Image (cartoon, helix red, strand yellow):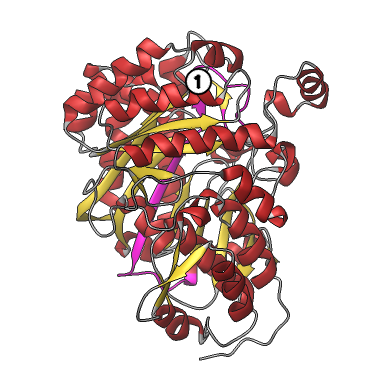
Amino acid sequence: MIASDISEPDVELNLGALLEANKHLQVDRDEYNINVTSNSGEGVSVEECKRAIANFDGAGKRAHLYFHLPLCNYICHFCNYVKRLIPRGKEDASLLLWQDLLIEESRRQLKNAPWMADAKIGSFYIGGGTAALMLNSTQTIAPLVDWVRSEYSIQPDVEFNIEGNPENFTKENLERALDLGFNRFSLGVQSLQDEVNDFTKRRHTAAQSLEAIENLKATGMPFNVDMMFGLPYQTPESVRRDFEILTDLDIPTITIYRLRNADRQDMGIGNRAVWNNPSVRERLIQEGRFPSLNQTYDMREVAVGELLGDGYSPSPCGWWSRPETYEGGNIPRTSKDKWEHYDTMLAVGPGAYGWLTGGGEEFLQTHNMIDIGKYANFMQKEEGLPLAPGRRLEGHQAIGTALGFNFKANQPIRLARYKEQFGADLVSMEPFASSFADLLERGLVTQTDNGDAFIPTLNGEALHEEIIEHYFHQRIGLSDAPVCRR
């Protein structure tokens, strides 16, 4: 099995044995769509959400800011996130429209909740869709950046992120991004195997990916390269070759994601992927396109082997970085804010979701309209916020969610934090004690020598999403045991 000490030499990996020993954590391909955010909690109406947001005590407290651009210049057949194809021949007009819509929603949020202007924004992220499409012109990115910097309390050491595909990160676009203050980038490659990218309808080649990587390296800024495993035409050997190439290039951070083939639209949290269409899915299954669960984890095993061999370590889980790439646990600031600290997250755009935490013991998950057309129509013709119903998390659901985010960060789960914030003793109180005892016995977490924190092992990192869902969202979050209030 994966050793729990990342510095241990000659690490022997055996994810097949790990899955066999933890059958309760096995999730099939078409059911795999684990979110760190909770799907539980009391439903909160749009009007209640609006009032709760307005009255939240967030001024002067840390927060992460996220803008979602739902446009892509091609649609990957596996993608089930909120996105739409940018109209051909109308790219500039469409980008300008969405720049205006996002700024307008932000303006309405700030009007509804003036405290947002005083929240301490330590990290900012423009995602999508393909956010870096906005770098094609200063007209479509500079006004949005200027708005963010003028209307929010952006901290001097802010991490300013933007994500895109290889064709977006040209030298010219990156120069524009640096001039605007972006200091971290996320590059979606997914595979260096052209056959894989052709089948998934990603319109870039391995050569274009490598060129984008060289362009990003030339900026001197940290960046991550997103890679997937479990895709059609991938094999453990092809994945191993991909990661050998990437690690030899000294990329700061390499992220690894398992194919999520569950229907997020049915779950109310995304758009239906091409592969989620029942007839398409059945045809692909009949053709034997998808690898088995064991083959899928064989791919992760060889990827992790290459990463460990080149000195990478995971923080957060699934994000493997070279030593000293980032401060404070070698974790990107965005991940530290969102996951380790579980700071408030302010979210703008269709399908965007955030949460109000502020270090309290109850949380509100906020959700925007998922339908892109309805969102745009609302923003152009109606007043108010484009909210969907939210969720209120308290008691075990709040604690389980905080634990899930903390585990995802792959940073110490400090016992004192949960006693102070929730009045919860993770060692002596149920359902926490038995959950962590089980995780310890299975080698999925370890405890610090002085006993003040739990830490995921590499075994735990390998199954982190499954652990979050089973132990924190279900076993802890759905518990009816009494909660000790502070």
Q: Give the quarter of the image for residue 309.
A: top left
Q: Which residue is mark 1?
A: 238
Q: Is residue 268 inside the magenta stretch?
A: no
Q: Nearer the viewer, residue 52 or 180?
A: 180
Q: Residue at x 80, y 18 (%)?
A: 283
Question: Is residue 170 in view?
Answer: yes
Residue 129 placement (x, y as % from top left)? 50, 30
Q: Is residue 62 inside the magenta stretch?
A: yes
Total label count?
Answer: 1
Q: Nearer the viewer, residue 124 or 449?
A: 449
Q: Which residues are magenta?
A: 55-83
Residue 165 placement (x, y as % from top left)? 41, 23
Q: Nearer the viewer, residue 162 or 428?
A: 428
Q: Residue at x 50, y 26 (%)?
A: 71
Relative placement, left or right, of 141 versus 50 is: left
Q: Main secondary structure of the magenta part?
A: loop
Residue 65 placement (x, y as % from top left)? 38, 51
Residue 87 placement (x, y as % from top left)? 53, 15
Question: Is residue 87 in view?
Answer: no
Q: Give the quarter of the image for residue 84.
A: top right
**Which residue is situated farthest in the front direction here?**
10
Q: Nearer the viewer, residue 285 or 365?
A: 285
Relative placement, left or right, of 287 versus 200 is: right
> Could you tell me which secondary element the residue under label 1 belongs to?
helix
Q: Residue at x 41, y 13 (%)?
A: 206
Q: Taking 276 as reference, is 181 above or below it?
A: below
Relative placement, left or right, of 11 versus 261 is: left
Label 1 neighbourhood size at 10 Å, few (<14), some (14-19), many (20+)?
some
Label 1 sits on what residue type?
Answer: Ser
